[in-house]
Image (tube, helix red, strand yellow):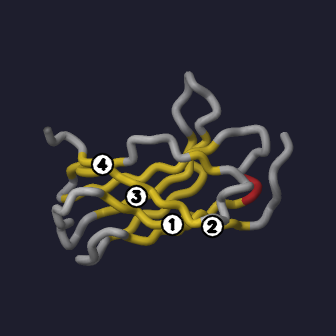
Amino acid sequence: METVDTKTDMVRGIIMKRDRRGLAPDTQIEVTVSDVSLADAPAKVVGRQTFTNDGKQMPLEFSVALKGDDIKANRRYALLARVTEGGKLTYITDTHIPVTPENWSTKFEVKVVPVGRG
């Protein structure tokens, strides 16, 4: 199977939310790039960054390393952000954010929405 290349690329951007609620000082943020090519199979994570906000509020910057040999030219990839406070998922992306060799050098703006409030 053909790969894009063997170098490491970075997917960078910022995570934002609309509400004004502050994040706890030890909030965990996880940003993943996953292969979402197969509809009937779990997505395979090909890049991940996990970090703590250390008291900072959104927008928060991220950068996920991708190895070219993990990225196949004929596959589809997506970006997902998860925000966890006190072990509980509180925010997540709710839209499909495609990642391609053509756009991964741009700075992504990832919007997260509240989970389980209503």
| Badge 2 density bin: few <14, some 14–19, many ≥20, Cα 10 Å | some
Relative image position of residue 55 (x, y in whole percent): 23, 77
Q: Residues within 10 Å of mark 1 (few under 14, many from 20)?
A: some
Front residue of this view, candidates 5 and 78: 78
Alpha carbon separation for disc pair 4 and 2 = 24 Å
The image quarter containing residue 5 is bottom right
Instruction: Quadrant for residue 19, please give it.
Output: bottom left
Name the element at disc 2: strand
Front of the two marks 4 and 2: 4
Q: Nearer the viewer, mark 2 or mark 1?
A: 1
Q: Amino acid at mark 3?
A: Glu
Q: Residue at x 54, y 37 (%)?
A: 43
Q: Earlier in the sequence, mark 3 or mark 2?
A: 2
Which residue in the protein does label 1 denote?
A: 13
Q: Which residue is mark 2?
A: 10
Q: CA distance from mark 3 to mark 1?
A: 13 Å
Whole-percent x, y for residue 93 in the image: 39, 47
Name which residue lies at 36% across and 61% down: 16
The mark closer to the camera, 4 or 3, is: 4
User: What kind of residue is marked 1?
Assistant: Gly
State the residue position of label 4. 113
Closer to the chain start, of discs 3 and 1, is 1
Q: Which residue is mark 3?
A: 30
Amino acid at the residue labelled 4: Val
Q: Taking 74 as reference, is 100 above or below it?
A: below
| Alpha carbons under labels 1 and 4: distance apart | 17 Å
Is label 3 or label 1 in front?
1
**Of residues 43 and 80, the one drawn nearer to the viewer in this rendering:** 80
Please, what secondary structure does the residue beneath circle 4 have? strand
Q: Report the amino acid beneath label 2.
A: Met
Q: CA distance from mark 3 to mark 2?
A: 15 Å
